[in-house]
Amino acid sequence: MTGSNGFAARHLRSALAERGVETVLATADVRDAEAVARDVKKAKPDAIAHLAAITSVADAWSREHDVWEVNALGTLNVALAVKAHAPHARLLAVSSSEVYGHMTPEEAPIIEARPVAPASPYGRSKAAAELACARTDIDLVVARPFPHTGPGQSERFAVASFASQIARIEAGQAPPVMQVGNLTAQRDYSDVRDVADAYVRLLNLRGGPHVFNIATGTAHAMSSILEQLLSLATMEIAVEVDPGRMRPTDIPLLVGSHARLTEATGWSPVRPLGTTLADVLDAARQGVTTS
């Protein structure tokens, strides 16, 4: 597994451990082709989950070279290492719904056959990563997860930022005013634990389609998500829009179909958004009390 200390990767490791699957954690920087090849040759894996990436859409605007080197070139290095040293291993390459770019309400929910048209540096790097590993001499499956959240997510991401700000305010560590970005965007949020379950199923899948959305099929306005979190707060909290949290371009609507994934693996989202948000806030509160 690459990117083994990342947010989704930690949950995937737990999901695999629950199933009794031994996980070997890659140590190489994916930008170092020789080191990646050594890792794959040594591990002799049956399957590889490639999650190493720069994952923040917001951060990518100011880190375009880094994002392309890690996300696109890093994926090419992993694919070449698999071809050379583990050609029969299943490679799960984790892409992103950001490759789809802008969509209209009439197109919702997006299916995998829709042409990609990324609108951000992050989305472009992920589309390039898909091309970098799109080869017929390895056993490849590409996952396109839509936004997901859950306990332990970095504050660089919107839902975790909301929760962390609420937790600090409740603890008296900050004034009762939250700073937010664009609240009009609508996003299809999954629970990261459901996403990890989808990754496990795709690692075990053989044959069939090679690109899969991981989504719930329902979009929620960021304002609605914030309202749900504020309803769980123990005190009144004001909200202010911070222009510094706005992105140069923000996709207004992003929602996907999981029909192909469900047909191929039986997967479906099982955790309601309200439960996920409560878990994120509880984790943020625990982080405040233990820091």
Image (cartoon, rainbow, N blue to C red):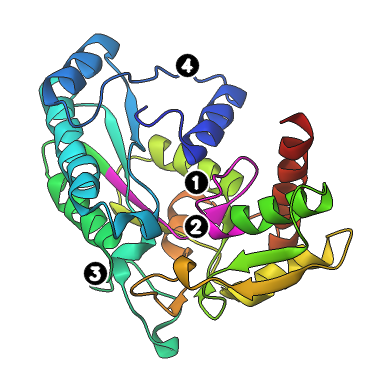
* Foreground pick, 143 / 67: 67
The x, y position of residue 15, in whole percent, is: 57, 32
Label 1 Cα crowd, 10 Å radius (few <14 / some 14-19 / many 20+): many
| Quadrant for the C terminus in the image | top right
Give me the C-alpha separation between circle 3 and circle 2: 22 Å
Question: Which residue in the structure is indicated by mark 2?
Answer: 262
Which tag is nearer the camera, tag 4 or tag 2? 4
* Foreground pick, 67 / 200: 67
Can you tell which quarter of the image residue 57 is in? bottom left
Which tag is nearer the camera, tag 3 or tag 1? 3
Q: Which of marks 3 and 2 is nearer the N terminus?
A: 3
Question: Which residue in the structure is indicated by mark 1?
Answer: 198
The amino acid type of the residue labelled 4 equals: Glu
Q: Do the residues labelled 4 and 2 touch (CB within 8 Å)?
A: no
Give me the C-alpha separation between circle 3 and circle 4: 35 Å
Q: Do the residues labelled 4 and 1 touch (CB within 8 Å)?
A: no
Per the rendering, the mark at residue 265 is none
The x, y position of residue 89, in whole percent, is: 26, 27
Question: Which residue in the structure is indicated by mark 4?
Answer: 22
Query: Magenta region: which residues?
Result: 141-159
| Rendered view: 111 above or below 283 | below
The amino acid type of the residue labelled 1 equals: Ala
Label 4 Cα crowd, 10 Å radius (few <14 / some 14-19 / many 20+): few
